[in-house]
Image: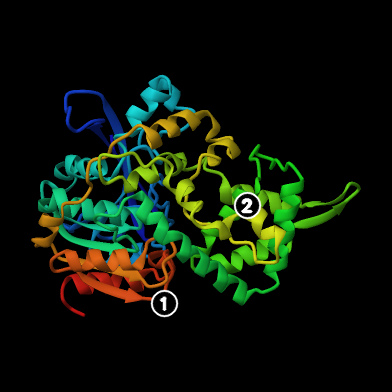
Amino acid sequence: MSVSYRQPGVVLTDRRFTVPLDHEDPDGETIELYAREVVATGKAEGDLPWMVYLQGGPGFGANRFIGRQAWLGRALQEYRVLLLDQRGTGNSTPANRQTLPLRGGPREQADYLAHFRADSIVRDCEAIRPTVTGGEPWTVLGQSFGGFCTVTYLSYAPEGLRAALITGGLPSLDAGADDIYRAAYPRIERKVAAHYARYPQDVERARRIAEHLLAHDVVLPNGYRLSVQAFQSLGIVLGKSDGSHRLHYLLEDAFVRTPQGLGLSDAFQEEVQGLLSFAGHPLYALVHEACYGQDAGPTDWAAERVRAEFPQFDAAKTLAGDAPLLFTGESVHPWTFDCDPALRPLRETAKDLAEDRGWLPLYDPDRLAANEVPVAAAVYHDDMYVDTEHSLATARSIRGLRAWVTNEFEHDGVRAGGSRVLDRLIAMSRDEV
């Protein structure tokens, strides 16, 4: 039974749906999807078109907005919005270290998670759309990985879409995981250089912390083992609007004097564990590289293998000289599953997904070239997470797509820019800009 309730300016309704785990076996096992319907106060009984929101990630549930935050206020001017927790996230049959053992051992868990890519998410959307809209097509707003899902939607079920709006999420149509990371590491290096140019004092601070971690076995209060590589992965924040500033404030308060000498402060450790833990979004670590699987071969820990091609990211070699320590960004490695207590029980499952799988294509270039759905996409010129050149190549490959290339925002532009970003995309999709 649906339950409705209110927040300032909005009426919310909890919606739950049952869909097949494997859409190729519609009579087989099922899972539950959760979504939150949002409509502006005073329009709850109105006949409004629908917008479905696909969150970034993978592995994150939809935003838990309060009232009309961020882009939602603009959307509610004319849409009824469905905030979908993609399968395995939020309240949609969660997949994590607590629930996955119900599937059996690592092999069975990996077999289960093989159904958690963009193609299955799109088929989920199509399975619930007739119930939600009465069969009418809807507009999809895809942020980051949600944009990847949107391009899959345009490839395999465009009849379900009235329009497609994409923010920071135009994927390469043919690059494999290795190609993704070969493009990513130089891009991350540029972000780190820009950070140090803004905060030159952080060069020495980062080196001191790395030296401390090489000399000490540091375990954070939640059980996370803070290795040097894990510390470097804090660079993931540099792709966000306030990320450089946040990293700076984190580094400046790292040490405190104790009876045993200098140590990493509780405040520093508390913030670091919040930034690095995958407890709230384990699917990100488990299926992240699988999102890039585009052919019959396995991804085989692509980020780890490709990192070896960029020795400037090796902390030990850096500290032996006088170069700035390089942070890393959006990548998952075998050691990630050793460091994080939320992931340790899933290490063999991740290994199976990385090494033993072949993946079918997620995009159909021929169908995209013949696209008839209005599509507008924000491409962030300095995006750390999604390669700009890959995005622009895809923009040229989707018939009728209108791209807005800007360096006004980072990857989280739809959050930071809020209604302004969404307003422009809506106008572009209607040829009003």
Tell me the amino acid under the disc marked 1: Glu
Q: Residues within 10 Å of mark 2 (few under 14, many from 20)?
A: some
Residue lying at the far bottom of the rendered structure:
433
Q: Residues within 10 Å of mark 1 (few under 14, many from 20)?
A: few
Would residue 84 be seen by someone viewing this image from the given angle?
no
Q: Position of residue 186 (x, y in %)?
A: 47, 64
Q: In the rendered structure, are the residues bearing label 2 and label 1 in contact, judged by CB atoms less than 8 Å apart?
A: no
x 27%, y 69%: residue:
392
x 51%, y 39%: residue:
334
The residues tagged by marks 2 and 1 sit, at their Cα atoms, a distance apart of 28 Å
Find disc 2 in the rendering and name its residue: 231
Within the image, what quadrant is residue 91 found in?
top left
Compared to residue 20, the image places residue 172 above or below, namely below
Compared to residue 186, the image places residue 269 above or below, namely above
Q: Position of residue 142 (x, y in %)?
A: 29, 57
Compared to residue 428, the image places residue 353 above or below, namely above
Mark 2, mark 1: which one is toward the viewer?
2
Find disc 1 in the rendering and name its residue: 408
Q: Nearer the viewer, residue 363 or 141?
A: 363
Give the secondary structure at mark 1.
loop
Q: Quadrant of the N terminus?
A: top left
> On the rendered structure, is 350 left or right of 121?
right
Give the secondary structure at mark 2.
helix
Q: Nearer the viewer, residue 10 or 284?
A: 284
